């Protein structure tokens, strides 16, 4: 198999994987695809350590780094500090979160823990292009980091030029054809067209409709298909739509390597394809997550409207940490796409890649046979 993106990075399989977990990223790259690390949880100093680890654990194979370039947001949000944040979070919203956790008997952090978690969170949050660029300075020092992926907006022109000068490829993740055009005009090398079935921030167009439209719109720029791809049949479909490879997220959550805690993995394995929901409850922008009492409460009629990005995540960060730390089974949720219904039991990254490739090959054979007859 040869596609333009495989040649760009010297890959053996056109499988790209997004993960916040370096073990998944390294294992996908070692298995012949390309892992990409989400950096939204890391300061520049932490990112340096993560990339150093990746350099030592991909067997010399390339990997990508996903950096958020948030589209314009009011300047005043850039200067929020742990001491002033309270002025931006309405009492109604704070009471709603507190009541929800109390209803489910979620224990509280000590005052010191709570302060430390919040300060840590605020220093990691990418709110400006300036902060995103600080992380990129780290990326430029690691030669196996071969691709920068930008979500929530195109990187500025000078960032793309600098990346190209360092021989890095730039990919832009989009959920609507008009954003694909913006990314290509900005100079990206690859467009990731992500349909609404995907985990995380999504638009409203399904992968089956979005991918061919974007492929035609941005040709000859290569497109990766994302959203709802977790097996070989889905991979064949993506390539049939004109994509040069697949960009995946949910399918890695059930692997041994993933960051997901056992209690949450159990919920993922029990979930069906209708157990996810697009909600603004995590970040303020619509994002697909695993259904839980937390998500459902925010979507209920009596819930306050989620705050704008980045205020919503400032509002709920501690609550989400408490839900995980104290293992509230009812409230536990995580970004997950509709392919969560295909996850049945724990496996390894290597096995997922292997199964996808075997099914890909079997499917092609079946189709050939169908056409011949
Ligand atoms: C747990 C999780 C967190 C995600 N967070 C981000 C993120 O921070 N930035 C981003 O560009 N995409 C993020 N995504 C979306 C992936 O990049 C990818 O587009 C998506 O998972 C593909 O669809 P699929 O989930 O159906 O495979 C996330 C996906 C998952 C599963």
Image (cartoon, grey):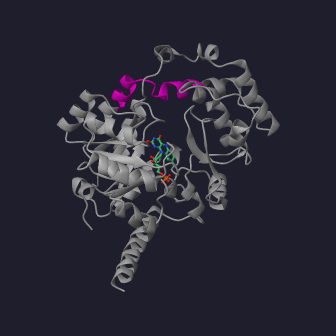
Magenta highlight range: 118-135
Q: Quadrant of residue 168?
A: top left
**Image quadrant containing the C terminus:** bottom left
Q: Is residue 131 magenta?
A: yes
* Residue at 35% across, 64% down: 240
Whether residue 333 is visible, yes or no, is yes
Q: Position of residue 207 (x, y in %)?
A: 45, 53
Q: Quadrant of residue 302?
A: top right
Identify the residue at image location x=26%, y=58%: 6
Q: Residue at x 58, y 30 (%)?
A: 313
Q: Nearer the viewer, residue 369 or 159?
A: 369
Counting the numbered discs, the total is 0
> Looking at this view, is 323 or 230 the one in front?
230
Residue 145 visible in this rendered orientation of the protein: no
Location of residue 355 in the rendering, given as x and y in whole percent from the top left corner: 44, 70
Up the image or down, 363 lies above or below 57; here it is below
Where is 152 relative to 29, above or below? Answer: above
Q: Residue furthest left?
A: 165
Question: Where is residue 312 shown, x and y percent of the image?
Answer: 60, 28
Q: Main secondary structure of the magenta part?
A: helix
Instruction: Pick the quarter of the image with the N terminus.
Output: bottom left
**Left or right of 40 on screen, residue 271:** right
Residue 107 percent location from the top left of the image? 76, 36
Q: Is residue 45 magenta?
A: no
């Amino acid at each position: 198999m040869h596609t333009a993106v495989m040649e760009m990075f010297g890959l053996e399989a056109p499988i790209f994987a997004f993960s916040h977990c370096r073990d998944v990223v390294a294992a996908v790259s070692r298995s012949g695809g390309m892992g990409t690390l989400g950096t939204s949880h890391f300061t520049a100093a932490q990112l340096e350590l993560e990339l150093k680890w990746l350099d030592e654990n991909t067997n010399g194979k390339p990997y990508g780094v996903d950096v958020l370039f948030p589209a314009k947001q009011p300047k005043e949000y850039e200067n929020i500090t742990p001491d002033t944040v309270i002025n931006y979070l309405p009492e109604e919203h704070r009471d709603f979160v507190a009541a929800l956790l109390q209803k489910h008997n979620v224990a509280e952090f000590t005052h010191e823990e709570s302060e430390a978690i919040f300060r840590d969170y605020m220093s990691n949050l990418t709110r400006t292009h300036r902060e995103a660029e600080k992380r990129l300075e780290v990326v430029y020092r690691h030669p196996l980091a071969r691709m920068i992926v930008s979500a929530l907006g195109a990187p500025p022109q000078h960032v793309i030029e600098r990346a190209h000068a360092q021989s890095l490829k730039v990919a832009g993740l989009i959920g609507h054809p008009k954003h694909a055009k913006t990314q290509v005009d900005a100079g990206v090398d690859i467009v990731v067209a992500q349909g609404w079935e995907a985990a995380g921030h999504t638009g409203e167009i399904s992968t089956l409709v979005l991918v061919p439209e974007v492929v035609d719109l941005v040709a000859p720029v290569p497109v990766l298909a994302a959203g709802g791809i977790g097996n070989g049949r889905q991979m064949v479909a993506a390539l049939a739509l004109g994509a040069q490879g697949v960009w995946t997220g949910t399918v890695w959550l059930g692997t041994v390597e993933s960051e997901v805690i056992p209690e949450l993995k159990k919920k993922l394995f029990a979930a069906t394809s209708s157990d996810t929901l697009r909600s603004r409850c995590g970040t303020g922008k619509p994002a697909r997550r695993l259904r839980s009492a937390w998500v459902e409460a925010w979507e209920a009629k009596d819930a306050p409207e989620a705050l704008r990005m980045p205020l919503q995540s400032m509002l709920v960060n501690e609550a989400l940490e408490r839900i995980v730390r104290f293992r509230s089974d009812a409230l536990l949720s995580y970004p997950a796409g509709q392919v969560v219904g295909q996850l049945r039991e724990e496996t390894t990254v290597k096995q997922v890649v292997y199964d996808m490739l075997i099914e890909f090959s079997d499917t092609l054979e079946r189709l050939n046979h169908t056409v011949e007859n």
